[in-house]
Amino acid sequence: MIVLGIDPGTAALGWGIIDRTGGSLGLVDAGCLETSPNLGLPDRLLIIHRFLGELIARHDPAVVAVERLFFSRNAQTAFAVGQARGVVLLAAAEAGRTVREATPNEVKMAVTGSGSADKDQVGRMVAVCLGLREVPRPDDATDALAVAIWAANSERSDGPAVPGAAVLDRAAVAPMTRGESSYERAVREAIARDRKAAPRS
């Protein structure tokens, strides 16, 4: 199954495509689309829409996963993310793709096991999950790959989420009390292997 993950933004939109085959995940492609600050918002959104349409047509993802706008102290940033998210949802709907949405904390929890993980931790675990020697760059692409990993894990472990369902930070509202999933076990084992292989100082 091909999954397209998106880290939305109007100035920089991160994207990452992974392939889930059985219990393994592999990198297909990733990058960051940057739009010129000299362009007006309508033109930026049009560029994003056209790019996403081409990306979906080229890689044919079964699922498009996008980070949900949870909160932001910067209202201008929140508006920009929200506008970019709308374009992502439109492009996915036009192509008839399944859409999955997650809060930043849910993505961090799925990739690192901690909802409070920092960018470096997320980057390292994205590399581990995808079997990469180095952390993908730029950061926007890494974040998008993390979203794709979350979606691939959700599709495998918990079944499809309810489309359009309101999602809050479950770690803060109602902590999940379930056993370790196969994905979580794989992440734990990957971390253990990574630590064992790391050179000792």
Image: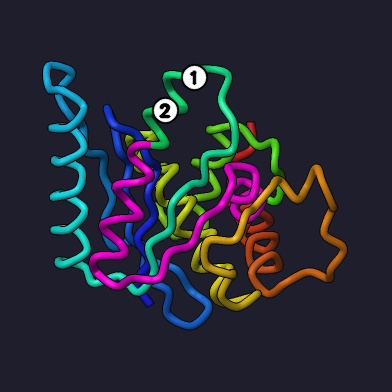
Main SS, magenta region, reads helix
Relative placement, left or right, of 124 versus 88 is right
* Residue 195 seen in this snapshot: no
In the figure, 137 relative to 36: above or below? Answer: below
Quadrant of the image occupied by residue 35: top left
Residue kind at label 2, given as amino acid type: Phe
Task: Find residue 163 and report its horizontal and vertical position in percent.
Answer: 52, 67
Task: Give the extent of the magenta segment.
Answer: 83-112
Image: 154 above or below 112:
below
Residue 110 point in image, percent of width and height: 63, 55
As drawn, the residue found furthest toward the right would be 177
Q: Nearer the viewer, residue 171 or 111?
A: 171
Q: Do residues under tags 2 and 1 come within 8 Å of each other at their CB atoms?
A: yes
- In the rendered view, would you say 137 is above or below 128? above
Horizontally, is 64 left or right of 101 in the view? Answer: left
Q: Give the number of the disc on residue 75.
A: 1
- For label 2, the crowd category at 10 Å Cα-Cα, with few meaning under 14, some 14 to 19 and many 20 or more, is some
Q: What residue is shown at x 87% (from left), y 63% (from top)?
A: 177
Q: Is residue 85 magenta?
A: yes
Sort mark 1 into few (<14), some (14-19) or many (20+) by Cα contacts within 10 Å. few
